[in-house]
Image (cartoon, coloured by chain):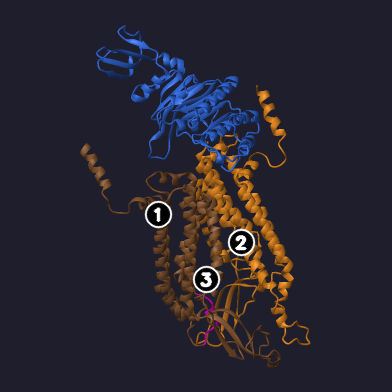
């Protein structure tokens, strides 16, 4: 009896075509629309970034020193540089794609709360999976792991492409590295954000167990996370201080956090007696990125643990 | 195979702290290989009991074992069809069956599942979203049977099927159960649908077990009697009695030979169930061979 | 016993206080959304009142204490103190007004229409003594009334806060009247956009009939529509032109275009001669022009755009009703 069972059970399985199997297949199939949309978004962003790379040099020419009328010193004429339009496309395109990377956390969290978890619990299809030979814990693990891999891979690839398309990272063209819409999209923090959004959304879905409220809760919690990190980003790494007599001007590459001047008798008159500034030099980019990514991964891990704990408490 | 399919002891389930218990102190034993009907009024706890057996809920009190193990450990051997037949609406029929195959890799039998779907004339490429309620039920049953379960839990399985489909699916179910020795637990409040199919009965009322045991034994333990209204029925246990004019009709559990003044017959399943539903205060009766007898 | 029952039914029939019928159903079904909206308006209004009163005063006195109001403004005045950053935070909370259209669209597509059609509660309502068209009318009218009330209040408060911050605006780099979010929050457009969100969401919900896809489509659709409508803004009213000989006219208002003028009055691209007279003469440049909208164009621009947005709203609502009628086959 058991032998026949195993035989009939394995025969059709053996003829199954290549490709993902088991829980992975079911997650990909159930969320095929989301998968297709993610694929389209990645394709579009990749195409856009390649185009940006192609016009990067042309865009930078618009920022070369020029002279009018053309002098003997070899500078190009200013009107010829002014006629370049690539810099507009380039700056807009890079800004658009970089902020898309920054804000990807919001749709991801809403999707994870609504479609990935909340809807399955609301409509009972989660129970359908749990009464196959799959425990709720393995179900949730697949629900989180498959999107996590796809999101991390896609976002990571886009960040690398973005850095490649930004070439020298000239702040006149691509924005300052510390700009709130720039910082996240040019480093590993972007991956941290989407993963944190996924975990927060899943936790919201398990807590609320209804599609739309879970989508809203996922969105709201990721918004809070984003705003908090945006506000405290400058405190994530020890700041550099510099003070000197007279005036002090920091280079543009420095992220100025605070600036104080001690004046003589009349404030604001003439030059200050003493100036001090607190800032992050360009070299703080990586420490800041890594600390922020670490925090995001910790948030993602905590939310994931909470989600599993909640599920285990609720189901045998 | 294990001898006992489901065994519950002092089983209770409460949703939220303040609300009434959905199940309260349920104890029963279901031997393997039976076709068990779970009957009771709305809100009696039928769905809660089946969810507990399917390993979808934690019991608040007591224990339940399925095929000799905790329900969560028996997941692979148990199939469950929930009352509202949840299925992914965006999947096609074929993909829904593949869903079953992918998630039951060690047990799945495509032929069984495909036969049930084919008998309903369903297009494998039709989206679940486009199916009628009855067609959806058929797919849900195909998914459950394709798993080749040892225990099949069906919550109101036939509610939205037409009579022909109901008949046909019931026959498939019974043939399959007889051939493979599957234990089937089926909840319903349509008693007629269970008559002739079931050989075991579990009657729930207000979260408690009212009747439990093999159907024949339960029926044999009761008598439907008619006689004069002024005649006494002591010492028998009266489940329910009604008087029309001077005539009294009662369902009793005889505690010895019945008086000759009474005309008595063995009740049908429907009569047994209806009498118990009409008389919620009647004492419980358990004949499922457990030493600590009645609750 | 029977009398008690009769008394109870009679009280139920007698029109009691509070909303009745479909309006009551709307408010009851979407109670959470109602509370959320009340909370959002309260937070926004509180923040704007803070900006209007204590916030600006504190920032202004801090500004004075830093010596920034002396005629020679020092460098220190580029940087904000705690009072100014508090003011900025309050201002951005007041700017919640800008997110209302998006929230309205997502909610209307998902919860208001999409979910009801997906799980059949819409049909439940139609099976009562309510025609689908009346159902949709109530679904749109009640939120529309609440949205109009809330956004109007916030707009008025935003204007108040904006005017009281005027002295600060002239000194520190502040927002301009034509910045997208300020332009929206200071006039009738905030209300029109909120209604646009509602209409787009309802249409998406009726088209897709499923909660989450409708939510996503409504949000994306609204973002695209508002971007498109916003890009039309500068062309909705005739621009004014300033010309000046020798140098550019002062930079004021919403500038659309600028460039150089030749002696024939033709507009040409600025050859960037700066002050090189020979270069200017070579290119026959005699002056410069600027096309711009002065701040007096605020209301004309605002009203024309509001009209266009409301027309789009009307189209979307009409489409929604037509779609519903075609689907349900019912006469209105």
Q: Which mark is residue C229?
A: none
Residue on which the image places disc 3: C180
* Residue C71 among those drawn in magenta: no
Q: Which chain is brown?
A: C
How far across and down, in percent of the image, does residue A173 sit? Answer: 67, 72
Q: Chain of mark 1?
A: C
Chain colored orange: A
Is A21 above or below relative to A246? Answer: above
Q: Secondary structure at mark 3?
A: helix
Same chain for the residues at labels 2 and 3, yes or no?
Answer: no
Secondary element under disc 2, as helix, strand or loop, is helix
Residue at 48% over, 20% down: B200
- Relative height, residue C254 to residue A226 (above, below): below
Residue C154 coordinates in the image, percent (x, y): 42, 67
- According to the picture, the residue beneath numbered tag 2 turns out to be A100
Q: Earlier in the sequence, mark 3 or mark 1?
A: 1
Name the spot of residue B281 as percent of width and height, x first: 33, 24
Segment tinted magenta in the rendering: C72-80
């Amino acid at each position: 009896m058991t032998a026949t069972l195993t035989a009939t059970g394995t025969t059709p399985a053996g003829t199954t075509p290549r490709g993902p199997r088991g829980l992975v297949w079911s997650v990909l199939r159930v969320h095929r629309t989301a998968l297709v949309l993610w694929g389209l978004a990645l394709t579009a962003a990749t195409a856009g970034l390649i185009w940006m790379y192609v016009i990067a040099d042309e865009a930078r020419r618009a920022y070369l020193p020029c002279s009018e009328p053309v002098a003997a010193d070899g500078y190009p004429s200013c009107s010829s540089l002014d006629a370049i339009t690539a810099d507009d496309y380039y700056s807009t395109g890079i800004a658009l794609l970089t902020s898309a990377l920054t804000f990807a956390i919001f749709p991801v969290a809403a999707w994870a709360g609504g479609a990935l978890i909340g809807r399955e619990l609301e409509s009972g299809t989660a129970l359908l999976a749990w009464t196959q030979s799959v425990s709720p814990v393995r179900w949730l693990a697949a629900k989180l792991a498959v999107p996590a891999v796809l999101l991390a891979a896609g976002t990571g690839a886009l960040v690398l492409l973005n850095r490649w398309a930004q070439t020298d990272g000239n702040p006149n063209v691509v924005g300052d590295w510390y700009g709130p819409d720039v910082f996240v999209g040019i480093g590993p923090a972007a991956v941290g954000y989407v993963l944190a959004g996924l975990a927060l959304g899943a936790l919201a879905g398990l807590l609320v167990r209804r599609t739309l409220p879970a989508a809203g809760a996922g969105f709201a919690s990721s918004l809070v996370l984003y705003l908090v990190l945006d506000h405290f980003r400058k405190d994530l790494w020890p700041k550099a201080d510099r003070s000197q007599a007279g005036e002090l001007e920091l280079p543009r590459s420095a992220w100025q956090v605070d600036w104080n001047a001690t004046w003589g008798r009349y404030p604001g008159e003439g030059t200050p007696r003493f100036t001090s500034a607190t800032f992050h030099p360009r070299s703080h980019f990586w420490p800041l990125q890594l600390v922020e990514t670490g925090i995001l991964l910790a948030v993602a891990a905590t939310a994931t643990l909470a989600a599993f704990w909640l599920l285990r408490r609720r189901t045998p | 195979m294990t001898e006992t399919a489901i065994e519950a002891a002092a089983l209770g389930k409460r949703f939220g702290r303040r609300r009434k218990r959905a199940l309260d102190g349920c104890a029963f034993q279901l031997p393997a290989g039976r076709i068990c009907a779970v009957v009771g009024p709305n809100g009696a706890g039928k769905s809660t009991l089946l969810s507990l057996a399917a390993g979808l809920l934690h019991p608040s009190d007591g224990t339940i074992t399925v095929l000799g193990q905790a329900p969560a450990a028996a997941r692979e051997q148990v199939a469950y069809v929930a009352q509202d037949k949840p299925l992914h609406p965006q999947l096609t029929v074929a993909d829904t069956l593949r869903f079953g195959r992918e998630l039951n890799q060690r047990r799945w039998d495509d032929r069984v599942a495909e036969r049930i779907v084919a008998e309903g004339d369903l297009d494998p490429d039709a989206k679940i979203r486009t199916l009628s309620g009855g067609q959806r039920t058929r797919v849900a049953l195909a998914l459950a049977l394709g798993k080749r379960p040892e225990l099949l839990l069906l919550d109101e399985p036939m509610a939205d099927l037409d009579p022909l489909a109901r008949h046909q699916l019931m026959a498939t179910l019974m043939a399959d159960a007889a051939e493979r020795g599957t234990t089937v637990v089926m909840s319903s409040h349509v008693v007629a649908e269970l008559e002739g199919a079931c050989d075991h009965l579990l009657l729930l009322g207000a979260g408690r077990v009212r009747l439990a045991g093999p159907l024949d034994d339960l029926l044999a333990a009761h008598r439907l009697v008619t006689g004069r209204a002024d005649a006494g029925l002591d010492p028998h246990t009266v489940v329910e009695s009604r008087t029309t004019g001077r005539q009294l009709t009662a369902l009793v559990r005889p505690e010895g030979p019945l008086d000759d003044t009474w005309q008595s017959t063995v009740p049908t399943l429907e009569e047994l169930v209806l009498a118990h539903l009409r008389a919620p205060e009647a004492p419980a009766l358990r004949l499922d061979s457990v030493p600590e007898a009645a609750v | 016993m029977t009398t008690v029952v009769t008394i109870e039914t009679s009280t139920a029939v007698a029109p009691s206080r509070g909303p009745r019928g479909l309006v009551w159903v709307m408010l009851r079904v979407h109670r959470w959304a109602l509370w959320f909206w009340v909370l959002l308006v309260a937070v926004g209004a509180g923040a704007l009142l803070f900006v209007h009163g204590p916030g600006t005063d504190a920032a202004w006195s801090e500004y004075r204490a830093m010596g920034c109001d002396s005629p020679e403004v020092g460098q220190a005045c580029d940087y904000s103190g705690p009072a100014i950053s508090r003011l900025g935070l309050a201002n951005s909370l007041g700017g919640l007004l800008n997110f209302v259209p998006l929230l309205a669209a997502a909610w209307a597509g998902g919860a208001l229409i999409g979910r009801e059609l997906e799980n059949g509660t819409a049909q439940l309502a139609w099976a009562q003594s309510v025609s689908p068209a009346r159902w949709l009318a109530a679904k749109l009218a009640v939120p529309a009334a609440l949205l109009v009330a809330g956004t109007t209040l916030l707009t008025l408060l935003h204007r108040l806060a904006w005017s009281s911050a005027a002295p600060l605006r002239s000194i520190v780099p502040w927002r301009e009247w034509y910045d997208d979010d300020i332009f929206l929050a200071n006039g009738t457009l905030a209300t029109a956009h909120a209604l646009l969100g509602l209409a787009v969401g309802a249409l998406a919900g009726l088209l897709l009939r499923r909660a989450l896809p409708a939510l996503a489509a409504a949000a994306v659709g609204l973002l695209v529509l508002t971007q498109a409508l916003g890009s039309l803004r500068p062309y909705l009213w005739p621009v004014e032109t300033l010309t000046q000989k020798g140098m550019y006219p002062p930079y004021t208002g919403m500038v659309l275009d600028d460039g150089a003028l030749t002696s024939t009055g033709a507009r040409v691209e600025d050859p960037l001669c700066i002050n090189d007279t020979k270069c200017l003469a070579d290119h026959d440049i005699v002056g410069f022009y600027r096309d711009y909208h002065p701040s007096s164009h605020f209301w004309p621009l605002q009203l024309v755009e509001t009209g266009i947005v409301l027309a789009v709203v009307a189209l979307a609502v009409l489409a929604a009703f037509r779609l519903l009628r075609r689907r349900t086959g019912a006469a209105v």
